[in-house]
Amino acid sequence: MEQITIPKPADLEGRIVQFENENLEIPGISSPHSREAFILQLIDSIRDIEFCGVLSRKDYAESFSDPHARNFNPLKGARYFHSNDELDEAVWLIFITIWFGKAKPGSWNLIRAFYSGINTNYIWTWENVTNHLDEFHSWLDGEMNNIKAHGKFGNHRKYETLKNFGRSVETYLEWVGSHYSHQLQLLHAIEEVGDTPSDLFDYLYETIGSVFRFGRMARFDFLCMLGKLNLYPIEPGSPYFKGATGPLKGAKDLFGANISNSRLEELTIELGRFLGYPFAMQIMEDAICNWQKSPNLYKRFTG
């Protein structure tokens, strides 16, 4: 992903003023305090995108992909696998990362506990799961309490339970296809809708809805991460408000409560495109969601 220069608040405010002058006023940020809070949330979201951009432009040692290693990091591990032509393992590692989420404190501990294959000789790589699916399910059922003891789900997955993970994996395998190849899946998607990044994203977003317990936010975050880390040539063309709660409420607070959901999405797209950053739709979705939690006083939200 191309490098992003993090904007100064005054520069970003200038762009928003220009957007309002050329398009329409944004009523939700008419006061100085609400405008400042929104701009600072945008900057946080831009910074989060650039964090992944930095990851995408670096090469990492094998140890980052090893759940037994002290410096295990699934995002850096995915980059390691991708740089070594192991796309399946890279995407699989991102899937389990999004499914479990990053907890605080403890960070990647729950992901590490699963991926390392506690009390078995396997690391649960893509190859091992697809070749030993029955054994995987037996192991998961037997070690569930042991895995849970090692960590917690991330904030966005805090209502999830490991009891659902086995079925999620099975439906994920079905989504990828009987060939169990992410590369072939991607090629099939390109055959279906072409190679425009937003069209590809949309196709994959709709089809991955078949994966059990992988809802709107997980689908959006998963596919965005594949794009940001340069694993798939995809980028969202909209914020995907259908099924959203916080982002949709934020859009209503920003643009007006009496505007239809489809028009709110259009306005969000227009503003995001005008600001002109890579992954602008995730920037907008994230910033709007966080801003509506505290619209008149900036607060840093993570997770």
Image (cartoon, rainbow, N blue to C red):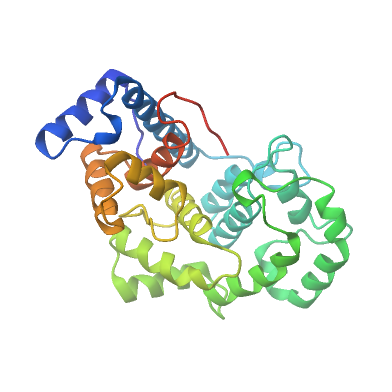
In the rendered image, residue 157, in percent from the top left (x then y), is placed at 63, 51
Q: Kindly tell me whether residue 125 is visible in this rendering.
A: yes
Q: What residue is at 78 percent from the left and 70 percent from the top?
A: 136
What is the residue that sits farthest to the left in this orientation? 22
In the image, 184 versus 23, the foreground residue is 23
Q: Kindly tell me whether residue 279 is visible in this rendering.
A: no
Quadrant where the image shows the N terminus? top left
Taking 197 as reference, is 9 above or below it? above
Quadrant where the image shows the C terminus? top right
In the rendered image, residue 148, in percent from the top left (x then y), is placed at 81, 52
Taking 291 as reference, is 139 above or below it? below
What is the residue that sits farthest to the bottom in this orientation? 178
Taking 92 as reference, is 76 above or below it? above
What is the residue that sits farthest to the front in this orientation? 258
Q: What residue is at 25 percent from the left and 21 percent from the top?
A: 11
Taking 86 as reference, is 167 above or below it? below
In the image, 52 versus 183, the foreground residue is 52
Q: Quadrant of residue 109?
A: top right
Q: Quadrant of residue 289?
A: top left
Q: Is residue 159 left or right of residue 42?
A: right
In the rendered image, residue 143, in percent from the top left (x then y), is placed at 86, 61
